[in-house]
Image (tube, helix red, strand yellow):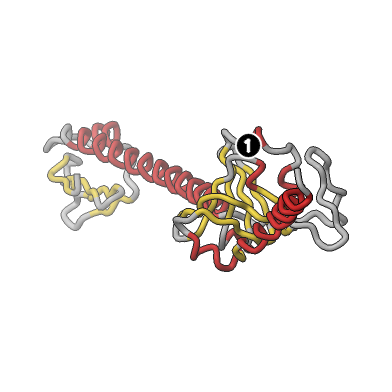
Amino acid sequence: MTRAVLGALLSLTLAAPAAARTDAVPVSKAGEQVGKQATIEGRIVATHASPLATVLAFAPNFAGFTATILAADRPKFPLNFEDRYRDKLVRVTGPVTAYRGKPEMLLHEPSQVEVVAAPGETPLPPGVPPPEPATPVATPPTPALDTARALAALDARVGALESRLAGVEQALAEISRANAEARARANQIGVGATGSQIRQLLGNPATIIDTTDGGAVWHYSNNRTVTFDRGGRVSSWSGF
């Protein structure tokens, strides 16, 4: 092989990474790449892992471009994946899609993620965990987590309302039963009944008011009354 051919191959080899870097799109313009195959470059500011997927956020509160690894592909990536890439400047390569109005990329293979080393910095080899940060970085709440918290609070309120409604229904049932019993007893009242018979049916009255003709009116709750004549016999009743 001639020196000219070797030189050409060496030039192509050295030029390939430079071309890749030139083709990288800033994360701020990721929305312009929807529907295209692209390399997006940006800093991962937060991560969130759930049983369904692992999400890498390139904007606070997951408001902008995200890269998502579905649960089926997660075993392909390093165990310390979230710690390895959080706060790192990275490039992700693949088709850019839109999800709920935001640009997104699905990562199926580790080769789709490349850490961009800062001057004087060497990227960590696969499987080597990064040093422990001085202050743990809190993961911002995701929309899914906010929704779950809201649903839990709503469920608690619904449970409290159902408990109160059950109490009201029980109280109404007791009132209805008491009224039914009172009506049943009232049906046994007859003209000429004695005071002793009325006490057995209705109990003792709340008040007794004598009338001018020598009779009396027995008052019960809920404006129920039984009127007796001067002979102590029932002459009429009302409110039952």
> Which residue corresponds to the image point at 58% horizontal and 36% vertical from the top-left?
71
- Crowding near pointer 1: few (<14 within 10 Å), some, many (20+)? some
Percent of width and height locating residue 87: 75, 58
Could you tell me if residue 45 is visible in this image? no
**Where 45 falls versus 216 (above or below)?**
below
Q: Residue at x 20, y 38 (%)?
A: 183
State the residue at coordinates (45%, 60%): 101
User: Label 1 is placed on what type of residue?
Assistant: Arg
- Quadrant location of the N terminus? top right
Position of residue 69 measured from the top left corner of the image (x, y, whole percent): 59, 43
Percent across and percent down for residue 42 are 66, 61
Give the quarter of the image for residue 23: bottom right
The residue that disc 1 covers is 74
Q: Quadrant of the C terminus?
A: top left
Kindly give the residue lying farthest to the bottom in the view shown: 28
User: Tag 1, which secondary structure?
Assistant: helix
Residue 160 is at least partly visible in this image: yes
The one nearer the camera, 168 or 52, is 52
